[in-house]
């Protein structure tokens, strides 16, 4: 097997994790074959087009194209490979467990071989999966395969940077030498390497995501209490975050966490615990708080507008966070359907996310100005930097009522109010209704 100098690497799954891992390993000098089951994805990649928006990925793929191949053929990615990375999706089942069918499909495609290869599990899987995989490999007589759990911690929007500069690299192995081989592969990357057993590595991943989600639900509840007691959650988070035992990250209150990972991984850990006989009550609360948080915007709109039937609401941003086009579990989708159910007319805008196949009954706008034209309120759903301009007079003048509900606390409340808007953030004081000039209704400027 090749050491860290130049290895042959097969990657299963050309998604966020697989493509970023493949491109970064190619950049380190390895020869990488990425396999996916979606023909259109492989065709696009062969033509040099990443299948989704991820900052820095297109350049990285182009710069390392000599060492990167894309294929639909499993054998191309496995025959002769020293390492086989599993980066396929592990979406939730209806029961809330992780659906491992794609992981098992990869295992079914592993060929018999004479030389040793290491299967590297990057997909997020329940604790105990490594043991099951080891048994399955043994049962099929695939004795040349080692197995290492090497969970991934990158976040979308900063995936390339996160892979190249991780806080830690976790390597859980059954055998010392397999763990050594994976650690050697990552040697050029400066980060502490946590060498541990397979089950603990699997749990590090689930517990990390669940802990981050818990922080978000915690600060969102603090925000909700701030609203009824007159404190400002942004100030509270600043004061809390300076305690080094707490830290400043993941204390941004908002409209709830979304994305392809926190919702599914929190639920998967809760189910894993439940299936093993332990009721993880804290996670039940984390999930419930998050679901309620997505809907609180409706109450804020009603506070200003009364019943929403017939009102026009502009949802600004659809992606589950900025710098990604990913719409999986985005709060925008829940919010749009709630508003439609209340009888509102919903306009939506996002600079990169294409929601045409997942949202119906809404009007898609190409620009922020189009979205807010004649609107009764604008809701900041995703913290896209361009939305900082929303307090400019052209937007205020275009709206029927100059109301902003800032689901991400993106704007400065004082500046927004000074610019003539009624402004509602999350966990920040809102002024008395009617006493404010910004609560005035204004006639829309037509034909803009
Ligand atoms: P994704 O949905 O973007 O991509 C998964 C890819 O795997 C798809 O292109 C799919 O077609 C492909 N696939 C399915 N079956 C296959 C097979 N048999 N052979 C080859 N390819 C196959 O998923 P993702 O976001 O990259 O996540 C992958 C895993 O990594 C998940 O377990 C996820 O929880 C975990 N993870 C994701 C992130 C993230 O930010 N997206 C971060 C850390 C960990
Ligand atoms: C998250 C983790 O941050 C990664 O470490 C992990 O690898 C990944 O999940 C995964 O396992 O897939 P990601 O979902 O891409 O990454 O994005 P985050 O930046 O963590 O944001 C997740 C959600 O939480 C977003 O909806 C975001 O808006 C929300 N969030 C985040 C808050 O509401 N407040 C915060 O303070 C931080």
Image (tube, helix red, strand yellow):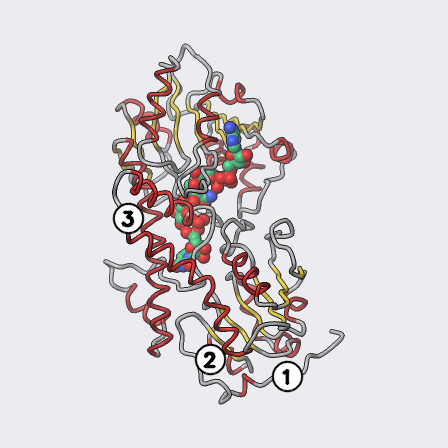
The quadrant of the rendering that contains the N terminus is top left
Q: Which mark is residue 442?
A: 1
From the viewer's perspective, tell me whether residue 62 is left or right of residue 116: right
The residue at the point 64 percent across, 76 percent down is 399
Q: Which residue is mark 2?
A: 414
The quadrant of the rendering that contains the C terminus is bottom right
Judge depth for marks 3 and 2 and give the one in front: 3
Q: Which mark is residue 316?
A: none
Judge depth for marks 2 and 1 and give the one in front: 1
3 or 1: tag closer to the N-terminus: 3
Q: Quick one: 336 or 250, which is closer to the camera?
A: 336
Whether the residues at callouts 3 and 2 have beta carbons within 8 Å, the answer is: no
Instruction: Please tell me in which quadrant of the rendered image residue 232 appears.
Output: bottom left
Percent across and percent down for residue 54 are 53, 46
Q: Secondary structure at mark 1?
A: loop
Asked whether the viewer can see residue 162, the reply is: no
Q: Which residue is mark 3?
A: 280
Residue 138 against residue 348 in the figure, above or below? above
Q: Secondary structure at mark 2?
A: helix
**Residue farthest toward the right in the current orientation of the protein:** 447
Mark 3 is surrounded, within 10 Å at the Cα level, by few (under 14), some (14 to 19) or many (20 or more) other residues, namely: some
Q: CA distance from mark 2 to mark 1?
A: 20 Å
Whether the residues at callouts 2 and 1 have beta carbons within 8 Å, the answer is: no
Percent across and percent down for residue 43 are 64, 32
2 or 1: tag closer to the N-terminus: 2
Whether the residues at callouts 3 and 1 have beta carbons within 8 Å, the answer is: no
Q: Quick one: 406 or 344, which is closer to the camera?
A: 344
Percent across and percent down for residue 111 are 46, 15
Q: CA distance from mark 3 to mark 2?
A: 41 Å
């Amino acid at each position: 097997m090749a050491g860290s100098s130049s290895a042959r690497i097969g990657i299963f799954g050309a998604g966020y994790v697989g493509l970023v891992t493949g491109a970064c390993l190619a950049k380190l000098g390895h020869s990488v074959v990425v396999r996916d089951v979606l023909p259109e994805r492989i065709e696009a990649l062969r033509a040099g087009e990443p299948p989704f928006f991820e900052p820095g990925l297109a350049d990285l793929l182009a710069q390392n194209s000599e060492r990167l191949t894309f294929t639909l053929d499993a054998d191309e990615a496995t025959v002769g490979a020293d390492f086989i990375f599993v980066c396929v999706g592990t979406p939730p089942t209806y029961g809330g467990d992780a659906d491992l069918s794609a992981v098992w499909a990869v295992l079914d495609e592993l060929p018999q071989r004479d030389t040793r290869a290491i299967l590297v599990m990057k997909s997020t899987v329940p604790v105990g999966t490594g043991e099951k995989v080891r048994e399955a490999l043994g049962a099929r007589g695939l004795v040349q395969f080692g197995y290492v759990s090497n969970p991934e911690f990158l976040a979308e929007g900063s995936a390339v940077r996160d892979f190249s500069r991780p806080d830690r690299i976790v390597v859980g192995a059954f055998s010392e030498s397999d763990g050594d081989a994976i650690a050697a592969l990552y040697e050029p990357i400066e980060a502490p390497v946590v060498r541990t057993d397979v089950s603990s590595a699997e749990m590090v991943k689930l517990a990390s995501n669940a802990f981050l989600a818990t922080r978000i639900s915690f600060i969102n509840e603090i925000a909700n209490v701030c609203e009824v007691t007159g404190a400002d959650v942004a100030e509270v988070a600043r004061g809390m975050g300076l305690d080094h035992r707490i830290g400043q990250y993941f204390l941004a209150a908002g409209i709830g966490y979304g994305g392809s990972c926190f919702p599914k991984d929190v639920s998967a850990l809760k189910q894993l615990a439940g299936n093993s006989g332990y009721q993880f009550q804290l996670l039940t609360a984390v999930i419930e708080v998050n679901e309620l948080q997505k809907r609180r915007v409706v109450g804020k709109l009603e506070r200003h507008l009364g019943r929403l039937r017939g009102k026009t609401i502009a949802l600004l941003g659809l992606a589950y966070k900025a710098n990604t086009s990913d719409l999986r579990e985005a709060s925008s989708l829940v919010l749009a359907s709630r508003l439609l159910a209340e009888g509102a007319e919903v306009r939506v805008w996002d600079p990169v996310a294409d929601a045409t196949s997942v949202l119906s009954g809404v009007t898609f706008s190409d620009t922020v100005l189009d979205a807010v034209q004649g609107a009764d309120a604008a809701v900041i759903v995703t913290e896209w930097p361009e939305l900082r301009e929303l307090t400019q007079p052209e937007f205020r003048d275009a709206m029927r009522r100059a109301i902003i509900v800032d689901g991400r606390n993106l704007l400065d409340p004082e500046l927004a109010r000074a610019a003539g808007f009624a402004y509602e953030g999350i966990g920040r004081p809102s002024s008395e209704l009617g006493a404010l000039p910004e609560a005035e209704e204004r006639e829309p400027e037509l034909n803009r």
